[in-house]
């Protein structure tokens, strides 16, 4: 796989100047979908402006403790994706999606930096009858709880990935939209009709695709969205 992407071909979810340089670093594959992740080096240099050049970024990664989801990372191509937590110089940040469908990095509190919501995208039974859930960020977690479904959300503690809470995709849940014309919006789920979902915000009922929903709580979100 090539180490760089043409800037003009980079995902539209990335906020970057597509005309100043020809290429941008390509993140390592494996965690998030490319449209929902950014290379760590790009975040440090172009979003947080902690470094000016990629060489400075690489030096920072080898000399400073920079954490993603509570674990130290040294590779500038490591992918930082949706709802990941980045910790740098005693400051903490979370990757979100804005209403223009772009990945953005917002500062969060130290208390919130130990929590991460993860959407269940798959579920399987392995040897011994154990249930394994597959999460949106590439993680797989074994659990005893069988009453969990694709589309539900688990809130995990970082960095040990222990499940703290489970939110079901059901009427009344607080949902955040990750795709579609309403991406970055949020409200309370009203109804699901097949592949279509209706959510309510400020008295208005809005239609979207069920697959675009990410449950973040019951009445209120479990994380800050602004």
Image: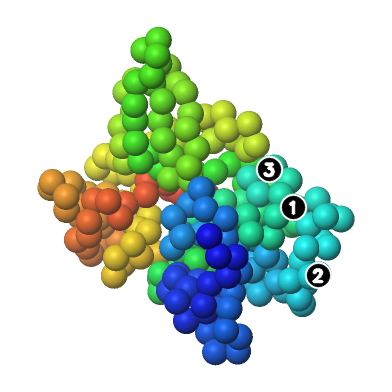
Q: Secondary structure at mark 3?
A: loop
Q: Position of residue 78 (x, y in %)?
A: 63, 55
**Which residue is tagged 3?**
70
Residue that sits furthest to the front in the current view:
1
Q: Is residue 146 above or below residue 13?
A: above
Of residues 203 and 128, the one nearer the viewer is 128
Instruction: Say which residue appears at 53% left-offset and 60% top-offset.
Output: 1
Image position of 77 (left or right of 187): right
Residue that sits furthest to the left in the current view:
193
Spatial separation of the CA atoms under disc 2 and disc 1? 13 Å
Mark 2 and mark 3 in contact? Answer it, CB < 8 Å. Answer: no
Instruction: Say which residue appears at 34% left-offset and 30% top-offset.
Output: 123
Spatial separation of the CA atoms under disc 2 and disc 3? 22 Å
Q: Residues within 10 Å of mark 1 (few under 14, many from 20)?
A: some
Mark 1 or mark 3, whichever is nearer to me = 1
Q: Position of residue 38 (x, y in %)?
A: 56, 63
Q: Residues within 10 Å of mark 3 (few under 14, many from 20)?
A: some
Q: Of callouts 2 and 3, which one flags the residue occurring earlier in the amino acid sequence?
A: 2
Residue that sits furthest to the right in the current view:
63
Residue 56: mark = 2
Instruction: Say which residue appears at 58% left-offset and 41% top-offset.
Output: 115
Q: Quadrant of residue 218?
A: top left
Image position of 64 (left or right of 2): right
**Which residue is tagged 1?**
74
Q: Position of residue 48 (x, y in %)?
A: 69, 70
Q: Position of residue 178 (x, y in %)?
A: 37, 59
Q: Secondary structure at mark 1?
A: loop
Mark 1 and mark 3 in contact? Answer it, CB < 8 Å. Answer: no
Residue that sits furthest to the top in the current view:
128
Instruction: Say which residue appears at 41% left-offset and 69% top-offset.
Output: 101
Spatial separation of the CA atoms under disc 1 and disc 3? 13 Å
């Amino acid at each position: 796989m090539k180490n760089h992407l043409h800037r003009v071909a980079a995902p539209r979810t990335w906020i970057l100047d597509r005309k100043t340089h020809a290429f941008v670093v390509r993140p390592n594959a494996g965690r998030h979908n490319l449209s929902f992740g950014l290379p760590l080096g790009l975040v440090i240099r172009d979003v947080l402006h902690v470094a000016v050049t990629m060489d400075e970024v690489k030096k920072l990664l080898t000399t400073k403790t920079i954490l993603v989801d509570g674990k130290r990372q040294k590779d500038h191509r490591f992918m930082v994706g949706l709802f990941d937590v980045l910790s740098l110089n005693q400051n903490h940040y979370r990757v979100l999606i804005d209403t223009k469908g772009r990945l953005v990095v917002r500062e969060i509190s130290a208390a919130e930096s130990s929590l991460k919501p993860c959407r269940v995208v798959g579920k399987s039974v392995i040897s011994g009858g154990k249930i394994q859930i597959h999460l949106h960020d590439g993680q797989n977690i074994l659990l005893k709880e069988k009453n969990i479904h694709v589309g539900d959300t688990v809130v995990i503690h970082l960095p040990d990935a222990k499940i703290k809470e489970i939110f079901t995709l059901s009427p009344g849940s607080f949902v955040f939209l990750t795709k579609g014309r309403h991406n970055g919006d949020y409200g309370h789920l009203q109804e699901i009709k097949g592949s279509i979902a209706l959510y309510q915000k400020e008295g208005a009922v809005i239609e979207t695709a069920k697959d675009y929903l990410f449950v973040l709580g019951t009445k209120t979100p479990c994380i800050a969205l602004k």
